[in-house]
Image (tube, grey):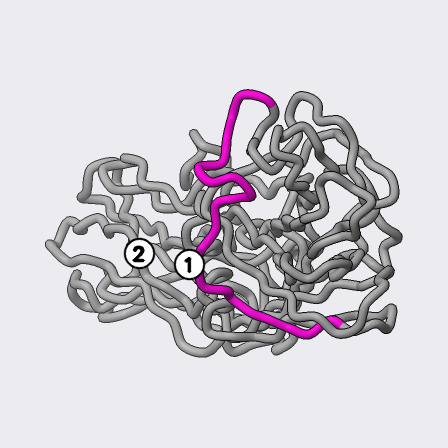
Amino acid sequence: MLLRSISLAVIVALCARSAQADVATLTPTKDATIFNDGAGNRADGQQSTLYSGRAGTNTTWPVRRALLAFDVAGALPAGATITSVQLKLYMSKTVTGAQTFNVHRLTSGWNEGPASGQSGNGAPASTGDVTWLHTFWNNQFWSTPGGDFATAASASTSVGSSFNWYAWNSTAALVGDVQGWLDAPATNHGWILIGPEGVLKSAKQFESRESLPQFRPQLVIDYTPPGPLVYCTAKTNSLGCVPAIGFTGTPDANAGSGFDIRSTNTLNNKSGLLFYGRLGPASVAFQGGTLCVQAPLIRTELQASGGNVAVSDCSGAFHYDFNTRIASGADPFLLAGITVWSQYWSRDPAATFTTNLSDALRFVIQP
């Protein structure tokens, strides 16, 4: 029977990606404040507040910058298109009026670290802290003291004197930053928030990811999930035909029907079935063809290809309405935002291993 050697049984427990919609709201995976102490010995990665701007004259390290990073690739489906981005911070302390604060894309990696300061002055740095000089105290450094970042600001906003939420609204640069982080996660180092550093007492306090949940920084992303994509290579069957996977309709968590996955150019009057997985694509030699879906795999029920009755040819075809499967609840992990990789297997008595494999289809279930 189909693919017994790699177990196509339905998984009892699988850690699936959380359900997504067309709008995702993220909180930081790390944030910190750095201080221009000159020696790189002040840090603040664990305090419930962030600081940016210039403090008064009662400190020897008055300039502060805030760093924030969000796990974009872990929250959005690969291949999504970012359409709008908004960064929101809650300002909770200030002694001055409206000031302009800019966010710049960071170009070097950094570590949040364990330091937890008080009253906006930070704490002595220890192993792993990010500081004005260090990306990782005390042996990894920024190329430029104060952080490595793009010269042009990705967004700017005026932060007033009211304790409230302030937003850095969508710009082409913000969208480009987030799209880049989704497409190439290794480039995601987050942003640095820079205030008016030449203005005395311009510094403002913002709530960090360690604050109460209702005040933590937010990154609001509007995106379009990727459409279905055909990938991988089909196995040529014993009559020299190459089966082709295709689709009509849209994968939808709420439609109940209407997303038809098909395999055409297949042998007529043979049995076959669609199988799928949720852990990613594959390219593994299997039964004389290519297994295009990463195990563990889940198979649907057997089907008949139909086609001409009198002769053997490639007039057969398989069809499977995947929206019907979603609606059935047979697989409770088929939720909005989940990416699915799928492929058709069928009988081919004259072929190596007496089987055939189509190419594959990747799709994201829409809300």
What residue does disc 1 label? Answer: 362
Which residue corresponds to the image point at 68% horizontal and 41% vertical from the top-left?
Answer: 35
The magenta stretch spans residue 186? no
- Residue 321, horizontal then vertical, whole percent: 50, 70
Residue 139 % position (x, y): 53, 21
Q: Secondary structure at mark 2?
A: strand
Q: Earlier in the sequence, mark 1 or mark 2?
A: 2
Residue with the mark numbered 2: 231
Q: Is any part of residue 121 visible from this angle?
A: yes
- Pointer 1 and pointer 2: residues touching (CB < 8 Å)? yes
Magenta: predominant secondary structure element?
loop
Q: Position of residue 336 (x, y in %)?
A: 63, 65
Residue 82's x, y, as percent?
Answer: 49, 69
Mark 1 crowd level (few <14, some 14–19, many ≥20, 10 Å Cα): many
Mark 2, Cα crowd under 10 Å, few <14 / some 14-19 / many 20+, is: some
| Residue at position x 64%, y 41% in the image | 36
Q: Is residue 235 above or below residue 103?
A: above
